[in-house]
Amino acid sequence: MRNCQLSIVVPCYNEEQAVGAFHRRLVDVLEPMGESFEVCYVDDGSDDLTGSQLTHLASTDERVRYTAFSRNFGKEAAMLAGLRMCRGDSVVLMDADLQHPPELVPRMLEMHRSGYDQVIARRDREGEGLLRSFLSRSYYRTMGHFMDVSVVDGEGDFRLLSRRAVDSVLSLPESNRFSKGIFSWIGFDTVSFTYHNAERVAGRSKWGGRRLLNYGIDGLISFNNRPLRLAIYAGLLLALAAMGYALWIIAGVARNGVGVPGYTSLLTAVVALGGIQLVTLGIVGEYVGRIYCETKNRPHYLVRESSDHPGPPAPDPPIRAGGGASTTSGSTRSRTLRQFIVFAMIGVVNTAVYLAVYATLNNWIPYLASHVIGYCVSIVGSFLLNSFITLRIRPTWRSFLRYPLSSLVNLVLSGALLYIGVSHLGIGKNIAALAAGILATPFSFLVARWAITSGAAASLPPEPEQVTAGTRSGRTGD
Ligand code: UDP
Ligand code: MG
C-alpha cells in the first residue's frame, strides 16, 4: 500500500563512513518540506559495518527501511531492489556518498509537480581528473553514435521518477540491466538541470578500470545490435578490399610476369583478418552470453534480510587482513588466485623494466653496475605495483625492507630446483631453468604477500567481487 509522498532510494556498498552523514543531511533537508517520506536503503552485500548501521537507523527512525542482499550484486540490482520496495508517489534515486546533494531534492520535486515524470540532476565535470573527464566524454560521444537510446554526459542515476515512471522501469524484465538506457527507453516528459559536481564525502569509488570497461561494453550492447551490423560492414569492406587487391596482383602478373611472392602483405592480411574475425566472434559471443543469462531467468539478487522481515542478528563483520579479507573460503581462494595471476604479470613487466634499464645504462656505465641499478629499479617497481595493484595496501617502509626477501627466496629456490632438474633428473639446462622459475613463483608470491601485508593496518578498500551472473553493476553519473 502506498502511504507516503516521497521515497528516497539509496544503494549502499561498503559505505560505513558515509551513510550516517548522508542520512543526517538528507533528513535535515526533507523534514522542513512537510512531505511524508521514507528512505529505502539497499545494502548491496557490504562487508564493512554498513549493514549494522542501516539496522540501527531503521530501529531509531521509522521512516527508514532497508533490504540487505546475500552478497554484492552490483548497483543496478541494488537500485532495482530499492525501486521494488519503495512506496512513494515519487521516487528519488541517490548515492550514499553525498555526491548527489540532498539539497537538490526540493527543486526536483517542484519540477515534478509542474508536470515532469523524470527530473534528472545532471552533474558538471568541474574538479574531475583530466583523464577521467576525457574518457567519459569520449565514451558518451561514441555511445551517441552507437546506441538506439540517448544517454547524455553527466546524466546518471540521480533523478526523480514519478510513480508511473517507476512502474514502467519495473515492468522491464531483463537480467542485464543498464539503467541509463532503461530510463531513456521508458520516455515520458523529462527535464534536467545541472549541478556542481561534488566530491565523495568518505571512502572510495567502487569503480576500478575493469569495472568501468565492463560497464561501457554493457551499455553498448544492452540497447542495440549495431555492433553486429558493424561487424557485417567491416567484413564486406574487407572482402571488397581483398578483391581489389587480388585484381591488382593479377594485373601486375599479366604485365610483368610472376614476381617474388609477397610474404609480408600475405602475412599482414592473414593477421588483420584473424584479428577482425576474433573481434567479430567476441561481439557475437557477448550477445550469445546475454541471451544465455536471460534464458536462465535467475533473480537479479537474493535478499538476506529486510526491515520488513528482519533476519537473525548479523555475525560480527570480518576483520580485514592485509589485502582485504573475504567472507567465505571460496572467495578467499579466488582472491588469492587473482592476486597470484596479477603478481605473475607484474613479474613479467618488471623483467622487461630490468632489461630496458640494463640495456640502456650499458651504453654509459659498466655492465655489472647497470645490472645492479636495473635490479634495484625492478624491485622497487615490483614492490609498489604489488602493494597498490595486487594487494591493494598502502606500502610502508617496514614492508619495503622485508620485500627483497621474496627475491632471495626466488633465487635460492629456483637455484635448488635447477640443480635437481639438471643434475638428478637430466633435464636440459634451458628447460630446467624455465621450469624452476615457474615452480618457484608461487613461493616468492607467498613471501612477497607476507612482506607487504604482515602487520599492515592501512589497507585500501578492497575491489568488489566481479559479479559473474545475473545483473552486472552500474555506475552513477558519468
Ligand atoms: N554501489 C552499490 N553497489 C556496488 C557499487 C556501488 O550499491 O557494487 C553504490 C555505492 O555505495 C554508492 C553508489 O552505488 O552509493 C555509487 O557508487 P560509487 O560512489 O562507488 O560510484 P561513482 O560515484 O564513483 O560513480
Ligand atoms: Mg560516488
Image (cartoon, grey):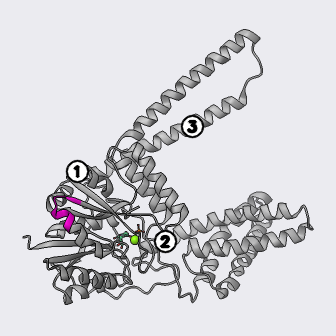
For the residue marked with disc 2, what is the amino acid?
A: Arg
Q: Secondary structure at mark 2?
A: helix
Q: Is residue 86 visible?
A: yes
Q: Quadrant of the N terminus?
A: bottom left
* Residue 372 x, y percent position in the rendering: 83, 73
Q: Residue furthest top?
A: 254
Residue type of the residue flagged with mark 3: Gly
Q: Is residue 418 left or right of residue 33?
A: right
Residue drawn at x 47%, y 69% is 334
**Residue 294 image offset from top left, x and y in percent:** 28, 51
Q: Which residues are magenta?
A: 110-118
196 horizontally vs 66: left or right: right
Q: Which mark is residue 277?
A: none
**Quadrant of the snapshot with the C terminus:** bottom left
Task: List x then y, in percent, for residue 84.
Answer: 18, 66
What secondary structure is found at the residue carrying circle 3? helix
In the drawing, what numbered circle is on residue 335? 2
Label drawn at residue 187? 1
Residue 361 sits inside the magenta stretch: no
Marking on residue 274 = 3
Q: Earlier in the sequence, mark 2 or mark 3?
A: 3
Q: Nearer the viewer, residue 325 or 112?
A: 112
Q: Residue at x 33, y 76 (%)?
A: 96
Q: Quadrant of residue 165?
A: bottom left
In depth, the one of 69 and 28 nearer the eye is 28
| Left-right relation of 5 to 155 | left
Residue type, numbered disc 1: Gly
137 vs 45: above or below: above
